[in-house]
Amino acid sequence: MGRIPEETIETLRERIDIVDLVGRHVSLRQSGRSFKGLCPFHDEKTPSFHVNPERSIFHCFGCGAGGDAFQFVMRHEALSFPEAVRSLAREAGVEIPESDGSDRGVTQQLRDINERAQRLFQRTLESPKGEAARAYLAGRGLDETAIERFGLGYAPDSWDTLTRALRGAGLDPALGESAGLLSARRGGEGYFDFFRGRVIFPIQDVRGQVVAFGGRALSSEQEPKYLNTTETPVFRKREAFYGFPEALAAIRKAGQVVVVEGYFDRIALALSGVAEAVATCGTALTREHARQLRRRTREVVLLFDGDAAGERALERALEVLLPEGLRVRAGVLPAGADPADVLEREGPEALRKVVDDAPPAFSFLIGRAAARGRSTPWEKADAVGAVIRQLAAVQNAVERGEFARQLALAVDARIEDVDAALRNELRERGTPDADPVATRPRRDGPEARNARHLARIWLERPALAAHLDVEDVAALSPEAPWDTLLPALCTAAREARGERFDVHALAERLGEDARGELAALAVESDQVDADAAGRAAGDLLRWFRRRRAEQAARGATRQFRADPATDPAEILATKQRQIEERRRAQGLPPSPARGGPRL
């Protein structure tokens, strides 16, 4: 595969909206000229991740991750640079010269083969072979428009339909096995289709690429009823949701996400106007799922049956969601019904009402616990014990205290006793540690603080650095990474003739530490008044020059004291030069002629 032309990369970089790209994975809120949210690359509860749309750059002040849109996709999707460029190019409609594709990355090959399989499943559903599947879907209330909207398909009841199709396209069946589409026959002699006789639901990632499938059996004798793609390099059940990317914009708009278990449930909600719904893919909610949700919203609505099994499912879900700081509401469905049943029997308004009227999950749990009895001390203790574990998992102290008050009122217990039970539970859990890499105040010395301030000014006002001598600037701050970053900013400003320069191009010249500082400056930079910036930059330059002169003077004194044989006249001349340098650094005139300085 040939090298991607630099001009193509630049065209793509200009066309990509980095806020939109990152916003698919992170719930971003505007903060000044930047946007911030929870970092997708490390576990945190206080936002330290910033995106600057003007410079098309991101940076996390917690873990240090940073870069442009390409680096974001590379890190988040585990792609190489060429793979990330080609992936974003397809979205942006930018054409990149391709070879025969034989050397394309494995992850992209898996995505491509899934897309090919998806087209085959869709064609099969439309063909005479899909008649039974179309009848089944019609019985579930899905017409042609809904089938097309959700990309539904059909895997025929055949052992080798997909296998033969892939071979006919010149694709290695082993790749189909890696994608979870084919299975190897016993003895290693050939392959057979993994999905057979099933309605197919395509599972997409946040960028809309098909990464896996779910299959619903048509025959009552076929087991299991639902079959999902096994884990692959592009599909991890523990963090995947069915409903992406359609639900992402709706989640941001609604400020909440509705989580269900089944594919048909998610479709029913979307058809009822609840577009912010997603479904897990054949697994219970996991911590990885919770983190995916937390990066996009604070509020989760769970729909479940109002029976004992549904209550247990709610309790398990809360144990996963609450430690991530999510606020959970519980929508109770009629016994034995799922969202699709409610849509079919009562219509979309009834289903939307279940979501809209969903109370806080704790209100439901507290009510159920109190309903079991509260007339004796033992019943009160049991009622408190039934929900204390979930209550202790609430991260916000104010929310936890309010729910404790509600629990005390509901079971007619003293709030002091509920608080004591809560403290015991928290003690048994252990005091939660602070985020290991959350944003902390910088503890830089004056050199680093002033160097950072100067770099920020030069980044915003390059004209102030364009005329400076690069070697002189390099001598100002001996501390890394400023000894390389400050001269690099001057060089970039000079090359751009004092105009705004390409931060991405500059970053490619720098080492890792300097590149990280540049990214941090780029995302947090603010508009600086030209006059104020000029005065501040001048003051900082004089501070550095004065500090260097003072250090040189102390060095000369130490040298004379350490070696009395040193020529005093030479030392005195050196000291006099240093005095004059300090006066110039302070903007003072030369000192009048007088006796030499004291050593």
Image (tube, rainbow, N blue to C red):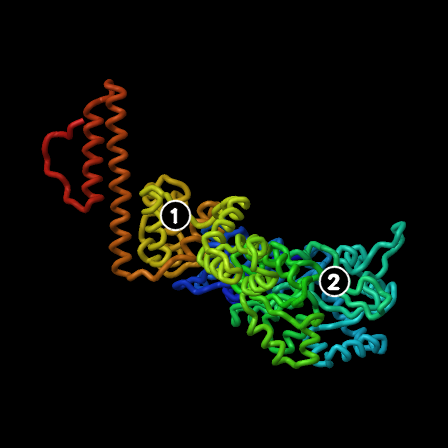
From the viewer's perspective, is 533 left or right of 318? left
Q: What residue type is labelled 2?
A: Ile
Residue at 26 percent of width and 51 percent of height: 538
Relative vertical location of residue 401 with respect to residue 258 in this rendering, above or below: above
- For label 2, the SS is helix
Identify the disc placed on residue 480. Answer: none
Question: Closer to us: mark 1 or mark 2?
Answer: 1
Residue marked by disc 2: 113
Tell me the element at label 1.
loop
Q: Give the residue pinned by disc 1.
A: 441
Q: How crowded is mark 2: few (under 14 residues within 10 Å), some or many (20 or more)?
A: some
Q: In which quarter of the image is residue 347?
A: bottom right
Q: Which of marks 1 and 2 is nearer the N terminus?
A: 2
Looking at the image, residue 366 sits to the left or right of residue 123; the answer is left
**Residue occupying the point 41% across, 41% down:** 480
The type of residue carrying mark 1 is Pro
